[in-house]
Amino acid sequence: MFGLENNMAGLGYFVFLIILGLLILGMIIIGLVDISYKRQRTKYYPKEILRKMLDDNDLKDVNIGIFKFIGKAQNFNYISNTIKIRTRDLNDPSVLKIYDMLFHFYYLFQIKTKKNRSFFWLKFVSYLLCFVFVIFITTTILIILCNVINNNNLDIDSITTAIQVLAIVGLILLIISWFSWTNIVEKYRKDLIDLAGEYLDDQTTKKIKLLTAFKAFFPFSENVIFFT
């Protein structure tokens, strides 16, 4: 691979590439899953179900604000005591959007009760995964540079060492991030399923349960760092 087939730098990069490829494949799969659940309709509407959950849990003073763009797990305004949802979600009774309301409520519930810091760590892992992609891009550039230099019969030892270190660090961070993501989501997944069982019909609850299983297994299944 780029002239590095017979050394540790090439091997480390190759393993890193395979695991990262699986992550990207997982992102594609969860994207397709989201599209599928977006097309499945329920008898509920997002704002109404969110309002009911708030009222039933002593959060009647919390307002629901309508915005064009929001960031999940960062959509609560402390000053106005407002939980934000997107304009385009208002009239969308899909399973995916009803799941989002459960997610928003649970995020707010954690803030109000200070129960745990699941969403803080979810954001941290998301940024860590972004850093892994930066490492991958940097390593790829170094490998291309190494190949160019090698073709001109120049010393590439320092570059191959850097490639090897970056590949190993990237691989370790990727594995840790993936494991951490699954562990974090599994911790609050049961609570979301319990919420669904309390406020939704059995058929919708089963769909939410399967959806959360996908979201627990695949990193980046929850966008908690970018506004959409």
Image (tube, rainbow, N blue to C red):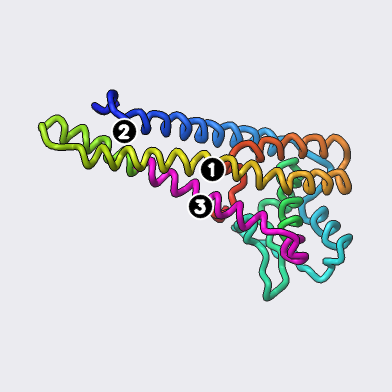
Residue type highlighted by circle 1: Ile
Q: Residue 127 shows which numbered tag?
A: 3
Give residue 57's quadrant in the image.
bottom right
Report whether residue 217 is seen.
yes
Q: Relative to 107, is 58 above or below?
A: below
Q: Position of residue 70 (x, y in %)?
A: 61, 58
- Pinpoint residue 175: horizontal percent, then vertical percent: 52, 39
Instruction: Identify the secondary structure beneath mark 3.
Output: helix
Vertical arrangement, residue 90 with respect to residue 208, above or below: below
Q: Mark 1 points at which residue?
A: 176
**Numbered label attached to residue 136:** none
Is 82 on the left or on the right of 197, as rendered? left
Q: Distance between the residues labelled 3 and 1?
A: 13 Å
Task: Say whether marks 3 and 2 touch (CB < 8 Å).
Answer: no
- Is residue 87 among what the camera can see? no
Name the mark nearer the viewer: 3 or 2. Answer: 2
Range of magenta residues:
109-137
